[in-house]
Amino acid sequence: MNLHYLWIKARLFFDRTEGASAIEYAIVIAMVAVVVLVFVGPLGDRVLAMFNNITTGLGGAAQTRPTP
């Protein structure tokens, strides 16, 4: 192996971009997960409140949020 061959192999290795797109997808997935966690909790409480209003309006008993 000569120095020129090693130089070409090193340049090809550093010019690859496939790993960068995988990292970008991982970052996007992490951001989506954070958004889901932030908005699902309050949204679930609002939906539960709406169903409880309907249930109590029909004469039923209100439900509580289940504990994890």
Image (cartoon, grey):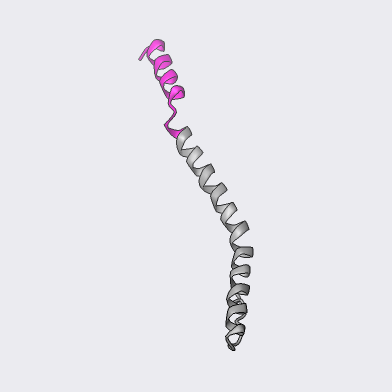
For image coordinates 46% across by 35% down, the residue present is: 21
For image coordinates 57% across by 47% down, the residue present is: 31
Observer-nearest residue: 34 or 3?
34
The quarter of the displayed image where residue 45 is located: bottom right
Observer-nearest residue: 58 or 50?
58
Q: Where does residue 68 sit, x and y in percent of width and height? A: 59, 73
Observer-nearest residue: 21 or 39?
39
Q: Where does residue 7 sit, x and y in percent of width and height? A: 43, 14
The quarter of the displayed image where residue 11 is located: top left
Q: Which residue sits furthest left?
A: 1
Observer-nearest residue: 12 or 53?
53
Q: Where does residue 36 sit, x and y in percent of width and height? A: 56, 56
Q: Is residue 33 magenta?
A: no
For image coordinates 63% across by 74% down, the residue present is: 49
From the viewer's perspective, is residue 42 above or below residue 3?
below
Q: Where does residue 18 sit, x and y in percent of width and height? A: 42, 32
Please provide the residue range marked out in magenta: 1-19
- Secondary structure mostly seen in the magenta stretch: helix
Quadrant in which the N terminus appears: top left
